Amino acid sequence: MSSIDIRTHTAIHVVKGALQKILGVKWTASVYTAGTHGGIAVQCNKKPTDEEMYNVEILSNEIIKQDLNTIVHEIQKIDAEKKWGDAIYDLFPIPQDITVLKIFELPGWNINTCNKQHTKKTGEIGKIKIQKTRFRAQKQLLEISFDLID
């Protein structure tokens, strides 16, 4: 994973945390990174307002400016589930034979099972600019694409 992909991937966790705080979403359906461009699709039962999406961007960038430490735990699956419950999971399943999980944590903001590389601090990400949102009512999905800008 290139350093820019690492920054963009870590930004996905920051954006998800903002979506959780503002829209109350829980489950991620998909994510992607391509250089400085990233995206996340979350299960959502309503189309967000322009103001809500503006606040997602503002809140995400505030977390980045705080230059918070990120933590990656390597922990037995059973212990992770006891500690964090299903909050560590997304809509895409973890194979049954996996017994040790890598958990990304941004304390008080985001916790997710994730085997990708991440920045050590949120300040390394750069600024997030949400470029597009699309609400798919029939699938109950909100798709967000963003770019990292310096």
Image: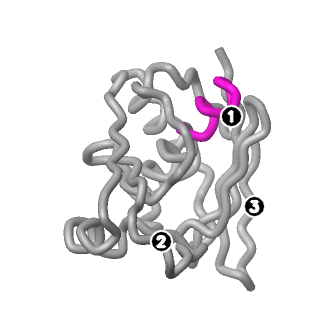
On-image quarter of the N terminus: top right
Q: CA gap, disc 1 to disc 3? A: 27 Å
Q: Which amino acid does label 2 sit on?
A: Ile
Q: Identify residue for label 3.
A: 134
Are the two marked residues, 2 and 3, in contact with CB atoms closer than 8 angstroms?
Answer: no
Q: Identify residue for label 1.
A: 1
Q: Is mark 3 on a helix, strand or loop?
A: strand
Q: Is mark 1 on a helix, strand or loop?
A: loop
Q: Which mark is residue 116?
A: none
Measured as percent of width and height from the top left, residue 2 is found at: 70, 27
State the residue in front, 75 or 122: 75
Q: Residue reaching furthest bottom?
A: 138
Is residue 51 visible in the rendered structure shown here? Answer: no
Tell which circle, 2 or 3, labels the residue nearer the N-terminal end. Answer: 2
The region drawn magenta spans 1-10
Reply above or below: 150 against 103.
above
Q: Which amino acid does label 3 sit on?
A: Arg
Q: How many marks?
A: 3
Q: Residue reaching furthest right?
A: 34
Reply above or below: 1 against 83.
above
Measured as percent of width and height from the top left, residue 44 is found at: 57, 73
State the residue in front, 13 or 24: 13
Q: Identify residue for label 2.
A: 98
Residue 32 in magenta stretch: no
Tell which circle, 1 or 3, labels the residue nearer the N-terminal end. Answer: 1
Left or right of 125, for residue 71:
left
Left or right of 16, for residue 63:
left
Left or right of 19, for residue 50:
right
Q: CA gap, disc 1 to disc 2? A: 22 Å
Reply above or below: 5 against 145.
above
Tell which circle, 1 or 2, labels the residue nearer the N-terminal end. Answer: 1
